[in-house]
Amino acid sequence: MKIKKVAVLGAGAVGSYVIWGLSQREDIELGVIATGERAERLKKKGCVINEITYHPYVWTPEKAHDVDLLVVSLKYGALEGALDDIHTIVGEHTTVMSLMNGVDSEERIAEKIDKSHILYALIKVASHKEGDGYCFNPETTIGIIFGELEMPYESERVGAVKELFSETGIHFRSTEYIREEMWSKFRLNVCNNLPQAILGAGVGCYQDSEHMKAISVGLRNELEAVAAAKGIDLSKADASSEHGSLVPPYTRYSTLQDLDAGRHTEIDMFSGALVRMGKELGISMPYNEYTYHMIKVLEEKNDGRFDYTGKDTSWI
């Protein structure tokens, strides 16, 4: 098995890392999935990554049918609307690798395609938008971790993905414990991504405030209780999974980036999913419930729900 044709669905902060890396290979076809105005814009302007413009092919879902590898790197809120496109793209020989946040995107994708197409994976990259493009530090990026859920762990497609990523600049490793690795990243997102989004400060806040640390620990304890109830042993994840890519203290992770930009966040796949799982398992989730509602109300604030005007104080 050799991967010769790769499609990227979602050319944002995460997809840019894949496009940047695979653009270094001249022996494959690399394309992004787009239609309409977005397709025309990508054809004209390309993808700006670390201040360099790349011009992958731009394919419709139909044109990309039966690619060797489909990388799904969408925001959580965009997945529902993309499921039919994924179904169209996936052919008999297609491997699907989701690099989305959270721990349930694969299950949602499997509602539309046979789950045997899915190679479980995650990515750790501190990417942010600058101007019309995205920037990240290739050297400090941890990269992509992937693997089979069951034996044989060194499958033919795992070997093919390793060969694809080799000599590209993409950092990667395979693992026998991909579910544990995914939950370990999930833990990082919930504990480090969310509290700073409520505070509106860089990640240095966890070192500089015992109160921020206490909130992070509370979220962590609840997540670990859910994982344990599901039989997920987080100690099996590699020791390096305890931390994300090295970043400066002013770094703002994705949830805060979304709020800064006035966008809706991925809170439904973070604390929202944990609260749902907690209810199913009978586990109390007060830290995650509060975090979920706080970020939801910050989204409402961005939507203008609380833009009160006038001087009528009769309600006081």
Image: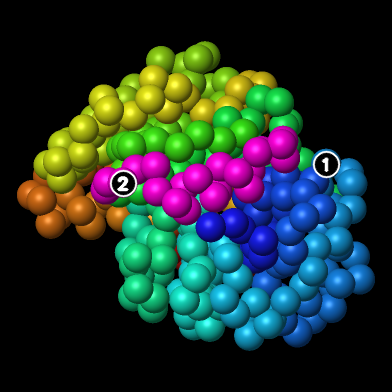
Which dot, 1 or 2, sits closer to the camera?
Answer: 2
Left or right, 21 with reference to 269: right
Q: Which residue is mark 2?
A: 152
Quadrant position of residue 57:
bottom right
Residue at 45 percent of width and 22 percent of height: 240
Q: Is residue 278 above or below residue 110?
A: above
Q: Is 311 within the magenta?
A: no
Give the amino acid at mark 1.
Asn
What quarter of the picture does the C terminus occupy?
A: bottom left
Front-lying residue, 97 or 182: 97
Quadrant position of residue 66:
bottom right
Q: Residues within 10 Å of mark 1 (few under 14, many from 20)?
A: some
In the image, residue 215 lies at what x, y percent? 35, 28
Q: Residues within 10 Å of mark 2 (few under 14, many from 20)?
A: few
Element under label 2?
loop
User: CA separation, marks 1 and 2?
Assistant: 37 Å
Q: Which mark is residue 50?
A: 1
Element under label 1?
loop
Q: Is residue 213 above or below residue 266?
A: above
In the image, residue 27 lies at what x, y percent? 77, 55
User: Which callout, 1 or 2, points at the residue further toward the start of the chain?
Assistant: 1
